[in-house]
Image (tube, grey):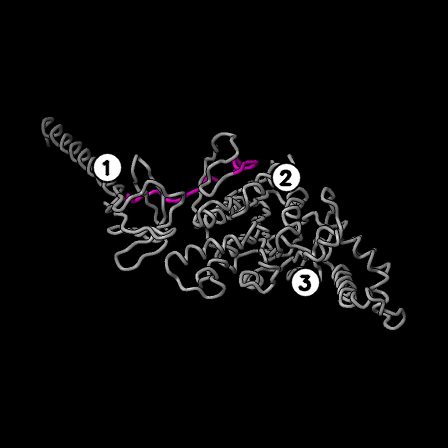
């Protein structure tokens, strides 16, 4: 039988052992949180938009701070490397930098604020507010990489989304989770059409990405095209044309990440990105700066790989979850519908809406060329009667367009072709259906009923 002294001694040893183990565990936890030392680099070359660094070891996408004279510090991101040289792209105007400038690696992962605090706000490519309404009080943050979704677990596109545009609702019906291209040249009403969608859509949340646009157009879109009611459920990501190509890339990723955050909460999101072409041009500038060979019209192969990486993040989420219905504007340079970005977008999207300069010059808005546009999931969204009426409408419209030169010169004779006779007789009513005022909203059911009445009357 042990004495009281032995018992106290044993208890003291146990407490001492427990205390030592606790302190050891705490020390181990602190050691695990310590980041391994990262070597600083030195600026060895500046060519165009690209910095070359020596002695810097950072992965692709890693961030660094380049220290210049008078306390200047330029944030940059790793965009490539070759042997011992690391290529960086600045995020802002590089000034005050000298040969041998110190480059400090940053351990900060690029994350942006998400959540309801963003509604009604305008943010930049770094997720910082631009509207002067104070800081964003968001509790959650998300990385730009997004969350991959198994394609077999995505919900199918089966429910129509009302966008408030008669011609799209009736003839190019859009489904929740569909991704479409808006192909247009400059000055044909693209921004106005996007604004009409934001005001009239039935989506829960709208995310607008203004990528590479003129600063004046960004200001006009926010204060003139958006109304107060739609602005309260809209998040605008603005990266004007004077920003670096790196930030133009990030702006598109930020808009997509914000849309994903709302989709993952079960909401239906309308993502309007203006434009996919500016995103591709930013990728082209980066690729050319690091010496990647061009493949088509100066676009490197990596540019065409980035497009589906961006687009595939939109769409439906898991079955029973939310959706991202996306419209990506694509600028057809010189109104060339065979532009490489136009051609690539046509292949990876679920349809496209073509805005015609020729139609815009006639004064009909929106200037949608129905014959050249298509919605690839429309048949899964609408009734057979609606589909048949839309096909009949397109047939009459295209018949008139094919023969309009004959009609204009007076070579058309009524009675020679009954099908053409019907197209000529219906032309004015078809054009009236396609036209819509800027402040006019036409819901999905109304557009369908008007189409059925119009074609039934034919």
SS at badge 3: helix
Q: Do the residues labelled 2 and 1 touch (CB within 8 Å)?
A: no
Up/down of 322 relative to 406, above or below: above
Residue hosting label 1: 26
**Is 369 in the magenta?**
no
Q: Residues within 10 Å of mark 1 (few under 14, many from 20)?
A: few
SS at badge 2: loop
- Tell me the quadrant of the picture where the N terminus can be found: top left
Sequence-earlier tag: 2 or 3: 2
Q: Which of 270 and 366 is in front in this view?
A: 366
Q: Which residue lies furthest to the front in this view?
A: 409
Up/down of 361 relative to 33, above or below: below
Task: Please identify, in this view, whether the residue under mark 1 or under mark 3 is nearer the observer.
Answer: 3
Estimate the x, y position of residue 322 in percent, counting from the top left. Answer: 57, 48
Estimate the x, y position of residue 362 in percent, counting from the top left. Answer: 75, 54
Q: Quadrant of residue 103?
A: top left
Sequence-earlier tag: 2 or 1: 1
The segment highlighted magenta reads 103-122
- Kindly identify the residue that appears in the image at 57 percent across and 38 percent down: 219
Estimate the x, y position of residue 135 in percent, counting from the top left. Answer: 47, 31
Residue hosting label 2: 226
- Left or right of 168 on screen, residue 343: left
Residue hosting label 3: 372
């Amino acid at each position: 039988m042990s004495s009281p002294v032995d018992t106290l001694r044993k208890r003291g040893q146990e407490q001492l052992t427990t205390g030592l183990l606790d302190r050891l565990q705490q020390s181990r936890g602190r050691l695990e949180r310590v980041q391994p030392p990262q070597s600083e680099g030195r600026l060895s070359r500046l060519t165009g938009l690209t910095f070359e660094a020596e002695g810097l070891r950072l992965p692709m996408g890693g961030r660094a701070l380049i220290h210049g004279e008078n306390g200047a510090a330029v944030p940059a991101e790793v965009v490539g490397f070759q042997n011992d040289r690391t290529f960086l792209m600045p995020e802002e105007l590089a000034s005050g930098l000298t040969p041998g400038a110190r480059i400090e690696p940053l351990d900060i992962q690029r994350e942006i604020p998400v959540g309801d605090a963003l509604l009604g706000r305008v943010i930049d490519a770094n997720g910082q507010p631009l509207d002067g309404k104070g800081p964003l009080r968001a509790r959650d943050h998300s990385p730009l990489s997004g969350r991959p979704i198994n394609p077999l677990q995505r919900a199918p596109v089966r429910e129509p989304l009302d966008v408030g545009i008669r011609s799209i609702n009736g003839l190019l019906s859009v489904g929740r989770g569909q991704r479409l291209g808006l192909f247009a040249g400059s000055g044909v009403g693209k921004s106005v059409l996007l604004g009409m969608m934001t005001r009239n859509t039935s989506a829960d949340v709208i995310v607008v990405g203004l990528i590479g646009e003129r600063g004046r157009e960004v200001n006009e879109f926010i204060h003139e095209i958006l109304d107060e009611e739609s602005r309260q459920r809209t998040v605008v990501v603005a990266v004007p044309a004077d920003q670096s190509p790196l930030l133009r890339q990030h702006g598109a990723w930020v808009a997509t990440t914000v849309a994903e955050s709302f989709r993952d909460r079960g909401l239906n999101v309308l993502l309007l990105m203006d434009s996919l072409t500016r995103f591709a041009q930013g990728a082209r500038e980066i690729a050319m700066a690091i010496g990647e060979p061009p493949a088509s019209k100066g676009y490197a192969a990596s540019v065409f790989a980035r497009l589906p990486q961006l687009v595939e993040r939109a769409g439906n989420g898991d079955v029973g979850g939310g959706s991202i219905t996306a419209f990506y504007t694509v600028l057809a340079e010189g109104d060339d519908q065979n532009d490489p970005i136009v051609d690539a977008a046509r292949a990876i999207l679920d349809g496209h809406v073509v805005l015609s300069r020729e139609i815009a010059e006639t004064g009909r808005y929106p200037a949608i060329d129905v014959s050249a546009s298509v919605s690839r999931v429309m048949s899964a969204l609408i009734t057979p009667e609606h589909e048949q009426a839309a096909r009949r409408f397109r047939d009459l419209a295209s018949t008139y367009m094919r023969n309009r030169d004959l009609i204009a010169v007076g070579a058309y004779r009524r009675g020679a072709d009954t099908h053409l006779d019907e197209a000529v007789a219906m032309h004015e009513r078809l054009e009236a259906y396609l036209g819509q005022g800027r402040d006019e909203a036409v819901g999905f059911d109304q557009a369908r009923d008007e189409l059925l009445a119009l074609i039934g009357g034919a």
